[in-house]
Image (cartoon, rainbow, N blue to C red):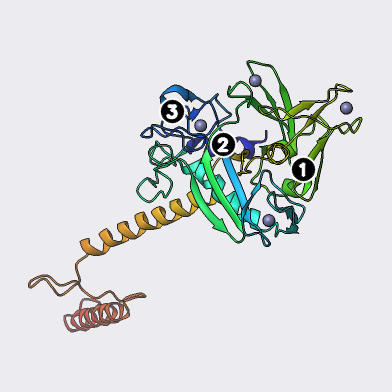
Amino acid sequence: MGRFGRFRAARRALIVPRVPQAPLVICRACGVVAPERRDGCEACGRPLRETRVAAPAMPLEQHWAAVRCGFVCNSCRFLAPLDALDFDGAVECAHCGLRQRFDVETWQGALELARSVSDLAGPSPEGRSPHLEIWVGDDNPHREVGVSQTFVKSELGMLVLSAAPGHPVCRRCTEPLHAQVTRRGVVDTRCPRCNETGSYALPAEAMRSEQLLGAVADPHRTDCPKALFTQQGGLATLSCPQCNAPLTPTPGSALQRCRFCNTSSIVTESHLHRALQRTVEPSTFWVLFPRGSAAREQLQTAAGTGIQEQSVGVLKSTRRPVGDEHTVYEAPEVEGPPALQILVGSVVGSVALLVGLVLARVFGLFD
Ligand SMILES: [Zn+2]
Ligand SMILES: [Zn+2]
Ligand SMILES: [Zn+2]
Ligand SMILES: [Zn+2]
């Protein structure tokens, strides 16, 4: 690290949290934040007094957001789930099977919102990494998240999004996963109980976004082949990618083992529900963001400008306009050298010298 690098690091160190960060409290059954003042988990419905658990610590620079996405189908008008960062420009409706155009630009706003929720959520009124001097707690729109609120919901174009703080959990053992970024855009996970590992890579198009560190969602898994999914009419079938035999999926894990060739393959939650003919609802997936957010910067800029305006106001009010006082007046200031004083001074001086010379002559001092 060069001298400037060190300097910058030192400056950055100044804006690390004032207070040690309290661990994020999540529902261990689903991984979504467990708000202090709620009894039941809004995401999975379990009683929070049984499922509240501290999420494992992540590096200070990284925040998870639990995200649920769906889109309103152009054909059947149902809300169809979107279980990953789908960046290929088209999405398929889980209800009617219609594949339709999806503007990937929509993700920009959606991810920005999810990032600001994970950054600004309570219980601390300033969110997770407050500025040393600028207080944003009064105007923070997400301060109730983690206190009385779970998700922040929004509609962006055809995308319907809910975002909350959280931490990915093992679906089988409902245990928070050990998760770490191992390469750019790649997150590796391990369940501390059943030891199942997973590796997830961002789609290439999502890698371009500076604000994404990684995502944990079944369709992004790269350590296993994906099960083949076909839908004809109302009938959805899953088959083994190795031997093509039909899979008889069991719920509870993304990994399904083929009875014939023993190959494990990934079945996304949405495909699983369709194969089991269940109602398909958006499932939760996880997006890892770097610390901070555009929303926090806006709050800080607004608060910072407020401080400046305030101090200018104080200055103005302490300075009284000249003339209000009855006895004291300030002399008007004149710019440049005092020409009149110099002129008068030299004229008086010359006259005195002249008078002196005349007197000397009169009294014959030089004789
Ligand atoms: Zn839950
Ligand atoms: Zn549809
Ligand atoms: Zn497990
Ligand atoms: Zn097989």
Q: Position of residue 162 (x, y in %)?
A: 54, 47
Quadrant (top left/top right/bottom left/bottom right) for the N terminus: top right
Counting other residues with Cα less than 10 Å from the Cα at mark 3, is it few (<14), some (14-19), or many (20 or more)?
A: some
In the image, is 243 to the left or to the right of 112? Answer: right
Looking at the image, tell me whether mark 2 or mark 1 is earlier in sequence order: 2
Dot 2 amino acid type: His
At a point 48% along the width and 34% down the height, the residue shown is 45
In this rendering, the label closer to the viewer, 2 or 1:
1
Q: Which residue is mark 2?
A: 63
Q: Which residue is mark 3?
A: 47
Looking at the image, tell me whether mark 2 or mark 3 is earlier in sequence order: 3
In three-dimensional space, the C-alpha distance between marks 2 and 3, rounded to whole angstroms, equals 25 Å
In three-dimensional space, the C-alpha distance between marks 2 and 1, rounded to whole angstroms, equals 36 Å
Q: Is residue 143 above or below residue 183?
A: below
Counting other residues with Cα less than 10 Å from the Cα at mark 2, is it few (<14), some (14-19), or many (20 or more)?
A: many
Q: Which residue is mark 1?
A: 236
| Element under disc 3 | loop
Looking at the image, tell me whether mark 3 or mark 1 is earlier in sequence order: 3
* Residue 64 seen anywhere in this rendered image of the structure: yes
Q: Is residue 366 above or below residue 103?
A: below
Q: Residue furthest right?
A: 243
Quadrant (top left/top right/bottom left/bottom right) for the C terminus: bottom left
| Element under disc 2 | strand
The part of the image, by quadrant, that contains residue 244 is: top right
Nearer the observer, 217 or 63? 217
